[in-house]
Image: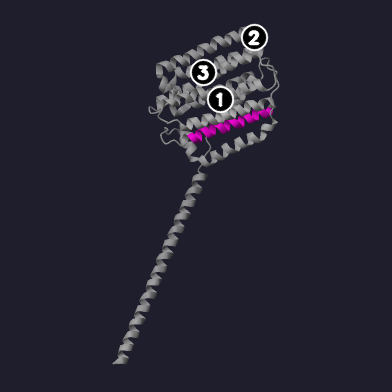
């Protein structure tokens, strides 16, 4: 009897051992399947990411969304201003290069910070910045770092001006980041941005050690107004496309916006004609005519919104206006 019980116990233990082995085999099989599934998923994700990168196709609009047209317009305007009054004033190449790097860095940084606000309307530029955010960050930091490294090559009298501009830009970017998106305080952005842009592009020529002519001062004021007109025009079209946007045009309302844009055109026409008839320099005369054409181009866009509103063409067209001084260089 005892031997029979012992045999039965041995058989039970053997069956239990076989069952445990089978369960372990099943567990190992399941783990292998899960591992293969994870590997396939990782492989598919990697392939998707690779395909996504390989699918990138250059479009001319990308140059605009990277603000390279802004940089080119700033450099052209800077050189045009630097040659006043006679058109033969020497150009500082390093100042021009650093200006381009700084404009690229500041505009890119402004777009990156602006894109972090969830309430912003999803424009094509916002979508582009979000998709290539890491690359744009590297471009931004690289351009600003290179500008800082090259700053020792600029004339000494420009250092104090450059330092003041850095402080002003830092305060501006900090202040803009603190302003709520849905606030009429956003109306301050356009005139302050215009002041920084005009000061960097045109005002920097007054600290290069050359004699400052009255033509340069008067036309510098006009240039500032042209930048205000350009940004106000942009905000006007943005307010038409995105009703939820808060900017200078939405705060002023359409009638006041139209009056200001028209008033800048008339002021530009009057002042530039005065410069044309009073200056002794042919170059200043030619540049004054170009400025009249720049303001007239802005006003034409205002009168023909159907030609520039689609696909945000007004931004590219507006930036190309600042290419016009190239005709007198």
Label 2: how many residues lie within 10 Å, few (<14), some (14-19) or many (20+)?
some
Image check: 86 left or right of 4? right
The quadrant in which the C terminus is found is: top right
Residue at (57% x, 40% y) in the render? 138
Residue matched to label 1: 196
Choose the circle earlier in sequence order: 3 or 2: 2
CA separation in Å, label 3 and label 2: 24 Å
User: Between tags 3 and 2, which lies in front?
Assistant: 2
Label 1: how many residues lie within 10 Å, few (<14), some (14-19) or many (20+)?
some
Residue matched to label 3: 297
In this rendering, the answer to whether 25 lies above or below 257 is: below
Image spot of residue 22 (x, y percent): 38, 74
Which residue is farthest left? 1
Is 16 inside the magenta-drawn segment?
no
Image check: 287 left or right of 21? right
Total numbered badges shown on the rendered structure: 3
Segment tinted magenta in the rendering: 93-113
Image spot of residue 236 (x, y percent): 44, 22
CA separation in Å, label 2 and label 1: 28 Å
Is residue 65 something one can see in this rendering? no
The quadrant in which the N terminus is found is: bottom left
Is 101 inside the magenta-drawn segment?
yes
Residue matched to label 2: 279
Choose the circle earlier in sequence order: 3 or 1: 1
Image spot of residue 291 (x, y percent): 57, 16
């Amino acid at each position: 009897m005892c031997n029979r019980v012992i045999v039965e116990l041995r058989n039970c233990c053997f069956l239990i051992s076989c069952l445990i082995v089978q369960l372990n085999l099943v567990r190992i099989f399941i783990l292998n399947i899960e591992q293969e599934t994870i590997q396939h998923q990782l492989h598919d994700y990697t392939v998707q990411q690779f395909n996504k990168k390989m699918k990138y196709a250059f479009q001319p609009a990308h140059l605009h969304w990277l603000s390279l047209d802004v940089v080119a317009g700033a450099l052209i305007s800077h050189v045009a201003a630097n040659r006043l009054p006679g058109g033969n004033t020497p150009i500082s190449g390093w100042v021009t290069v650093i200006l381009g790097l700084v404009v690229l860095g500041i505009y890119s940084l402004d777009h990156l910070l602006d894109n972090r606000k969830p309430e912003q309307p999803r424009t094509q530029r916002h979508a582009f910045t979000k998709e290539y955010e890491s690359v744009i960050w590297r471009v931004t930091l690289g351009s600003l770092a290179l500008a800082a490294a090259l700053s020792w090559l600029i004339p000494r009298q420009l250092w104090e001006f450059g330092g003041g501009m850095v402080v002003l830009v830092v305060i501006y970017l900090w202040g803009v980041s603190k302003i709520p998106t849905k606030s009429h305080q956003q109306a301050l952005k356009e005139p302050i941005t215009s002041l920084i842009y005009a000061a960097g592009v045109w005002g920097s020529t007054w600290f290069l050690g050359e004699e400052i002519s009255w033509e340069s001062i008067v036309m510098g004021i006009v240039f500032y107004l042209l930048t205000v007109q350009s940004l106000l025009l942009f905000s006007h079209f943005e307010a038409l496309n995105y009703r939820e946007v808060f900017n200078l045009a939405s705060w002023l309302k359409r009638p006041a916006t139209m009056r200001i844009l028209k008033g800048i055109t008339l002021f530009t026409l009057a002042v530039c004609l005065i410069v044309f008839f009073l200056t002794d320099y042919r170059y200043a005369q030619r540049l004054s005519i170009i400025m009249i054409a720049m303001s007239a181009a802005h006003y034409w866009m205002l009168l023909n919104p159907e030609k520039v509103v689609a696909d945000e063409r007004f931004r590219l067209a507006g930036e190309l206006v600042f290419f016009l001084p190239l005709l007198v260089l």
